[in-house]
Structure formats: C-alpha cells, structure tokens
Image: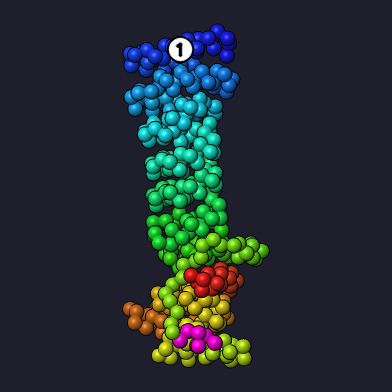
Amino acid sequence: MSRVQTSTLTDLIDLAKEPSSAKRRELLRKVTDVFMTHPDTVNEQEMALYDTVMSQLSTDMETAVRAEIANTIASAKAAPLGLLRKLASDEIEVAEPILTRSKALSESDLVHIVSTQGQDHLRAVSRREEVPESVSGVIVKRGDDTTLHTLLSNDGARLSRASSEAVVQRAQANPDLHEVVVNRADLPPDLMNDMYFVVEARLRERILAENAKLDPSVIDSALSKGRNQVAVAYGSFPEDYERIWAEVETLRHNEKLSPSLLAKYMRDPNPTWFLVALAQMADIDYLTAKHVVDRKEVDALAIACKAAGLDKALFLTCAMIMLSDSENAMGRAAEYGKLYQDLPLDTAQRTIRFWRLRRADGHAA
C-alpha cells in the first residue's frame, strides 16, 4: 500500500465519525472492499488503521450489515484482529462465517470464544475445517449433546485422550451420540469397545469388524493407556460373591473348572455360581458377565464363550437357558448357532481383551 493510501485511511478515521448511518454504512462497505483487494500485503501499521476505521464504522451498525462484513472478511487469511474478535463474539448471524471459516483467528482466540460464548457459537466453531485439541476439549466440557454431535461429526476436529474418554462417558448415556462416536476414525480402540454394551446390533458389528483389523501391538498399546475415567460398571456384587469367587478360583487353579461344571452351574438356583464361573472361564469381570446374562445379550455371550474355548453346543445351552422366558427362543436356536459359528476366534479373543480392561475399572467403580 502506498503512502497516499495510508494517508487516505488516516483521513477515513475522521470520516468514520460521520453521524449519518447511511453514509457510515456505505463507507464501511467501501473500506472493506479496498481491504479485500490486498489483505495479504497489508503491513502492521496499515492493519491497525483498517482495524480502527472498520471497528468504528461497524459500531451500532445493523445486524444485516455486520453480517455482510463478517461474511466478506471471513475468507481473508489476515484481517483486522480487533474487528474480527468483535464480530466473532457478536450474535450468531454475524459471528457464524467468522467462526466457521476465518483462518485469521488464532487457537487462543478460539479457546476464548468457546469458553465464553453460547451453544450456537460453539457449534459454529465445531464445524471449522480444523478444530485443535485444546478447542475441542473446551467444547466437550461446555457443549450440550447437540453441540457435541456437531463436533464429533467433524473429521477435522482433533480430540485428546481425556476428551475421548469424556465423550464416551457421555455417549454411553445418550443413544443419539452412539453412532457418531463409534464412527470416529480416531477413537482409541479400548474406548470404542467400552461402547459395545450400550449400542445397537449394527454398531456392535462395526466394533467387532474394527477389532478384527487391529494388529496385536495396537491392542497392547491401547490397553496400556492410563485412564482418567473408568468404564461404566453394571449392577452390584452379591453378598456371596467373594466366597463363591474364591471357591471357583480354587477349582480353576486345580483344573477342575470345566465346561460340564459350567453347564451344571447354569441350573443352580443361585445364579452367582454360573456368573462367577463364566467370568473366570472367559477371563472377564463379574459385573460384565452379569450384564450379559441379565440383559440377555446373546451376541456378547457368544464372544465370551468363543474366547473361552467353549463349544457351540454349550453356548447354545447357555443361550437357551438365558432366554428361557423369551418368545420363540428355541425357534431361534439355528440363528444363534450361526452367530457363534461365524464369529472368528481371533475377533472374539481381541474383543475379550478390551472387556478385561473393565475388570480393574469395574472393581474400581
């Protein structure tokens, strides 16, 4: 920009005090147009002048005019920061193009906005091409479920480990978030498996499909991650849990915990025997085993039995007893048998490894 143009901008500062709103509006548009012809070549002094003029002119301007200006400068890689921050904190009709598109806003600017503004502003930031971890972290903490869904739907939003844990914790209680969480490409595999017991069948299939692709070293890495939050535990321990656990554990150490004994326990009037035996044979925690049986989770039972090396006949016996009061349980035996048959052993074993993480988490909870 030439010295003459800089001088002209200085003169505009005085013209910006013009009381006529119509003249101020026209002047704002003209200055904006001039700025947008060369935003990348404006030096620091000139940018400060533009900031002064445009900020002063936009004061008390109608919402439609402020929105027009915001939409125009949102595409500039460099922009008058005072004006930009002012527009970004304006009502959402004005702020939205700045929040969704402007690359001139810094990460700290975005953190400030999502820390101080309402849900509409948080959702606009959530739709940016890239959302840094620090910004996503604040949105996860402050955003409602609609905002969180918007953020998670954006592949350009990066989540820290702590934010991912918080997301899964919230999603477990909200079915509207299930699919968008499970579909996150960057969701750590152990946290994805925490979603298994709360999502519908097709999402469970996706989780198993992802488990089947995992390299064993990736599983080891995932399981070694320290958790700030525990997995959700289901139910509570019965009074006789410790006694029965100790007795069954002794049988297991003496190699007397067998499939036939598990079948016997299935018919015991005290369900704790069967649940403890199933938990020890599948090497999962008691509360997970209890959840599988209480909720009649046949697919989860298939995973536990397959990983434990139990044959299909014993699995079907367990399933039939578990579903004895369900409609047409016997008629669906072939379906359950196919489910067990089609489940790859290595997929079941990989999935069980994630469930085992719940053992420590569940007891801690």
Give the main secondary structure of the magenta stretch. helix
Q: Quadrant of the N terminus?
A: top right
Residue in the image at 39% along x and 50% along y:
144
Q: Nearer the viewer, residue 235 or 342?
A: 235
The magenta span reads 240-246
Residue in the image at 59% along x and 62% along y:
226
* 114 in magenta: no
Residue 174 visible, this angle:
yes
The mark total stands at 1
- Amino acid type, mark 1: Leu
Residue in the image at 53% along x and 38% along y:
108
- Residue farthest to the right? 217
Kind of element beneath mark 1: helix
From the top left corner, tell me how far across and down residue 247 is, in percent. Answer: 54, 90
Q: Nearer the viewer, residue 134 or 209?
A: 134
- Mark 1, Cα crowd under 10 Å, few <14 / some 14-19 / many 20+, is many
* 242 in magenta: yes
Q: Where, by quadrant of the figure, is residue 335 drawn? A: bottom left
From the top left corner, tell me how far across and down residue 204 is, in percent. Answer: 47, 65
69 shown above or below 131? above
Residue topped by disc 1: 12
